[in-house]
Amino acid sequence: MQTIIKEVVIVLSIARCRATQCLYCFLCAAQHLALNLIEPIGKRSQRASVALVAATWMLCGCSPYLYEKEVGSFSSSVSDVWSAVAQGLDNLDQDQAAADLAEVVSARAGVNLSTGCGSEDPNQACRLMVIPKTVPDTSAADTFGPVKPQLLKVLVALKGYADGLAAVTNAQDRKDYDAAASQLASSVAGLGTALGAAAPGGAAAGPALSAVTELVTWTIGERLDAARYKTLRSAINAVGSPSIDVEGQKTSAIQIIADNAITPELRAVRSARITLLFRQLNARADRINSDLAAAKTARVSLDRYDTPLMELASLVATLNAIRGVDPEAVGRSLVEAHDELQKAVNDKSRQFQNLVSSLADFADKAAAVEKAFAKKPTAAK
C-alpha cells in the first residue's frame, strides 16, 4: 500500500505542482498518508486510501479559482446591457428616418428636405417631410443629445469594471495578475468618477473607490488564488457597499448605476423606439389600405401588397420585442446579481444557489434586451 500511495503522490505532483504553491498540498497529503499507514489494514482499503490522498490534493491550494465562472457570467451580462443601450441609441436615427419615409410614401405627396440635408454639421440630421411642411419635428435622437455622452460614459465605466473583474479572475501568473489588478483599480476609480453624470456627489467617489481596491503584492510563497481573491473581494465591496452620499443617504455605486443610468436610459430608448415604430406601422398600414381601396375589385400586385405586408409583420415582431423589455427588471437584476456576488466573496461558506439563480436571471434579461434593441427597422418602400 505504501508503494501505491507513494506513486500516486509522485504522479499528482508532476501533473499539478506549480513551484512552491503546492507545498501545502504535499503537507496535506503527507498527513493523510501517515494516518493511513498507522491504521490497521482491515479498516481502510488501499483504494480508499488512494482516493483520500487524491481528494486532499484536489481540495488544497492548487484547486481552480472559485469564482471564475460566476464573474465571467456577470461580465458577459454587463456587456450585453451596454451593447443594448448603445445599439438602441444608434437605431433611433434609423427608426426616425424609416418613419419619415413611410409617412411620405403613404401620403403620396411632394417632399421637402430639412436644412440638415445640405449641412456639414453632424448634429443636424437630414429629414424627409411631406409638403407643405418645412421644419421637421424634434427627432427622438435629438432628445438624447444633451445627456447621451454622460450616460454612455457611465455604461462604459461599468463595462470596464466588469471586464476588470474578469481579467483578475483569469490571471494565470504574476505578470497577468499585476496588469489585471492595476486595470481593475483604474476601472473602479473611473466608475466612481463617471457616477458624477448619474448622481450628485457621485464624482467624488472615484478616489475613494480606488483607494479600497486591494492590490496584493504577493510573493513566491503566496498562492495566486489568494491574491486574486483579495483583489476581487475589495473591488466588489467598493462598488457594492453603500458609501456614496446621495440626498442624505448612503448608496452603493452599483445601485446608483442601476437607478440613475441603466433603468432610465433603457426606459427612454424603449419609449422612443416604440413611438417611432408605431408611426411607421401606421403609415405602412395606411398605404396598404389605400392601395386596396384604389384597386377596388382588381388584384393588387405583389410589390404593392404582399411585400409591404411581410415587412409590416417584421416591424410588428420588432415592436413586440422592444415592448417586452422591462427596464426596471433589468436594473434590479444587475443589482441583485452584484449583491449576491458580493455576499459570496465575503463568505465562502455560503450556499451558491442564490448567486447562481441571480446570475442566470441577469443573464436572461440582459440577453433579451440586447436582442430586442439590436433589431433594426425595415426600410420603407
Image (cartoon, rainbow, N blue to C red):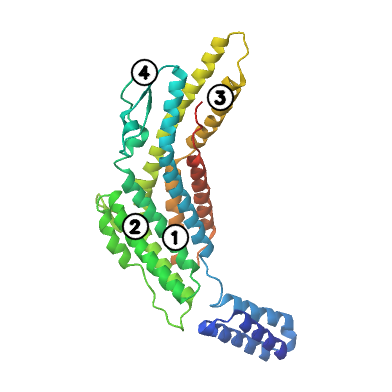
Q: Circle 1 — which element?
A: helix
Q: Give the residue at mark 3.
A: 308
Q: Circle 4 — which element?
A: loop
Around disc 1, counting alpha carbons within 10 Å, would you say few (fewer than 14), some (14 to 19), or many (20 or more)?
many
- In the image, which is nearer the foreground, mark 4 or mark 1? 4
Q: Are marks 4 and 3 in contact (CB under 8 Å)?
A: no
Q: Which mark is residue 172?
A: none
Q: Quadrant of the N terminus?
A: bottom right
In terms of depth relative to the viewer, which is nearer, 278 or 95?
95
Upstream in sequence: badge 2 or badge 1: 1
Quadrant housing residue 40: bottom right
Amino acid of disc 1: Asp
Q: Are marks 4 and 1 in contact (CB under 8 Å)?
A: no
Q: Position of residue 2 (x, y in %)?
A: 70, 90
Question: Which residue reaches farthest top?
Answer: 297
> Separation of disc 4 and disc 1 at Cα?
51 Å
- Whether residue 63 is visible here, answered yes or no, is yes
> Separation of disc 3 and disc 2 at Cα?
46 Å
Q: Give the residue at mark 4.
A: 131
> Separation of disc 1 and disc 3 at Cα?
44 Å
Amino acid of disc 3: Pro
Upstream in sequence: badge 3 or badge 2: 2
Q: Give the residue at mark 1.
A: 163
State whether residue 82 is above or below residue 93. Answer: below
> Separation of disc 4 and disc 3 at Cα?
24 Å
Amino acid of disc 2: Leu
Q: Give the residue at mark 2.
A: 191
Upstream in sequence: badge 1 or badge 3: 1
Q: Do the residues labelled 4 and 2 touch (CB within 8 Å)?
A: no
